[in-house]
Amino acid sequence: MILEFQSTTRIIDTNFEYPRSNNSLRQIHKEQWLKYYACLIKRYAQIKSEKILHPVALIVLEGTSVILKCEICISPLVVYEVNTIEWYFNSSSNNNITNELIQSTQHTLVSQNSKHLKMYNIQLEQDGQYWCQMKDTIGALYYLHVDNGHEGIDIVHSDAVPKVQHPASSEIITDYNLKLYTTWTNWSPCSKCANVGIKIRYGYCTLSLLENPVYHASIDDDNLNENIQYIMETLFYVFQNKLPCKFRYIPNHIRKHIIIKQRKIEMMIKYCKKNCSNDVVFEVYNKVGKIIESANNSASIYSMIQKIPSLVPEVTRTILYGTINKKMQIKCPGNLNIETPIIWKIGIKILPFNKYHSNSTIFIDSRMRIVFKKLKFTDSNIYSCWQNNQLAGTVKLIVTGETELKLNYQYMMFGTIAIVSVFTVVIWRVLKGKTRFTKH
C-alpha cells in the first residue's frame, strides 16, 4: 500500500483567531461587543459633560409589582463575572445609611440572565433607594416610593367607552411653570382564559418643567425662597425632567398645591379574552432534526440542560375574625409572582369585580380586595384568590357576635368611695398607734 502525502501551506489570517473558523461563535462574539459598545454610547450620552449618573424616581402602589433594571455595561471580557452583580437597598424610614444587601425571597427575585430586580406584592417597608453593583461599578440609583392608596383610586376607562369616568387630562400649574400628567404602567395579562376577563394598568401623577431644566452647580442658601426656582431646575435636571407628584424631595408647598392634591392614582380597566395556553414543552434535537429529549415544563418536568427553575410561591392561608355589622376588608394573602389581576371565588363561584354603590353589601374594590360594607353571619366562609387559573391564597372568615361590656357607673362610684374610705381608715389607725420615741 502506497500512501501519498500532499504538502499544505498554512496561511495565518483572522479565520484562525479565537474562536477560529467557527462562524457561529464569531457572530455571537461580534454581537456581544457591539451590544457592549452601544451600552457605553448610551451611558456617556446620559451623563453628558456634567458627569452625572441620573437617578430614576418611581412610584408604585402597595400590593402591586415593579421591575428595576440593572443597566451596567458589561464587557465580553468579564461576562463570566455577571453573577457577581448584587442589589442594595436603603430604607426611606431609616435615616442611617445601611446599604443593605438584598436577598432573594418569595416575592423578591433577581433574574438570572439580565440581573433585573423583580418585586411582587410590594409592601410599604420596601420604600427607599435601590441600586445594582458589580464590584466597583454601580448602576443607576432608583428612588422608589410605595403608595398606600389611602387617598383613593379612581377607576377609569378608555376614551372610547361612553358614559364612564375617563382618565384625567394634563394640566399646567402656572405658579411653578410645571406640567402635570399621568404616567401609565404596562397592561397586565388577562385575568381569565377562554372567557371574558379584565386587564388593568395604573396611572400615576407625574410632574415635568415646561422648559428644559438648567443645571446649577451651587445654590446660595442665604435666601432659600428666592432660590426655589434654582432648586426645582436642579432637581428636575438630575431626574431628567420627570418626577412623581409625591416625590419626597419636591418642596412641600408644591406637593400640597390644590391641583396636585386632588390628583389620585388611576386604574384603567379593559375587558379581554385570551386562549388558554397549551403546555410548554422543552425539546432537544440532534443534528438531523430528530427529537431526542422532551420535557413538559408545565407539569414541572425539566431537562437536565435547562437552568434551575425558580420555586413557585407557596399558597398562603389565613384565618380572619370579623364582628357582626362592622365594615371589613380582605386582601389576598398570597401572590404567584405574576401581574395577572386577582380573581376571588367562594367555592367555584366567581365574585364579580364591581365598583362600590349604595345597594352593595360586598364588592371587589380597585385594589382587588373584598369589601364588606356590613358583615353578616352568613358572610362566614372560605374565600380563595386566584391568578392565571392557579390558587394563590385562601382566607377563612369567621363572623362573631358583638360583645359589649356594660358598666353601671353609679355602682362603680360607690365602690370606689368605699375602697378609698377603707384605705384611709387603715392608714389613720396605723399612724395613730405609732409611738413617738425621744432619744436622750
Image (cartoon, rainbow, N blue to C red):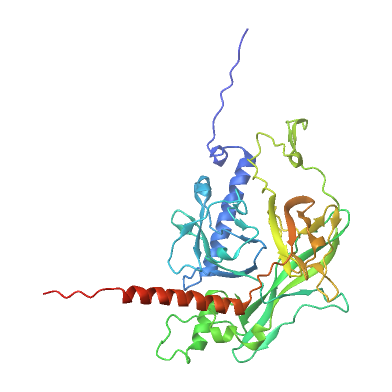
Q: Position of residue 51 (x, y in %)?
A: 46, 70
Q: In screen coordinates, is 77 left or right of 166?
A: left
Q: Which of the 4 image quarters holds residue 255? A: bottom right
Residue drawn at 64 percent across, 77 percent down: 206
Q: Residue at x 61, y 63 (%)?
A: 123
Pick the residue in front: 169 or 218: 169
Outermost residue, left side? 440
Name the residue located 80 percent from the left edge and 68 percent from the top edge: 269
The percent coordinates of residue 83 (x first, y second) are 52, 47
Q: How many marks?
A: 0
Specify the farthest residue to the top.
Answer: 1
Residue in the foreground of this view, choosing between 80 and 382: 382
The image quadrant of residue 211 is: bottom right
Task: Look at the image and tell me whether residue 287 can be seen.
Answer: yes
Give the quarter of the image for residue 360. bottom right
Depth check, front residue: 215 or 359: 359
Report x, y in % for residue 369: 74, 64
Is 187 on the left-hand or right-hand side of 71? right
For the C terminus, the quadrant is: bottom left
Q: Is residue 281 visible?
A: no
174 over 248 or under it: above or below: below
Q: Considering only vertical position in the picture, is 271 above or below 216? A: above
Question: Looking at the picture, does residue 278 appear above or below residue 136?
Answer: above
374 left or right of 6 in image: right
Q: In the image shown, does 423 or 251 lie closer to the viewer? A: 423
Q: Which corner quadrant holds the N terminus?
A: top right
User: Where in the figure is residue 105, as x and y percent of width and height?
Assistant: 58, 51
In this rendering, is residue 301 above or below 68? above
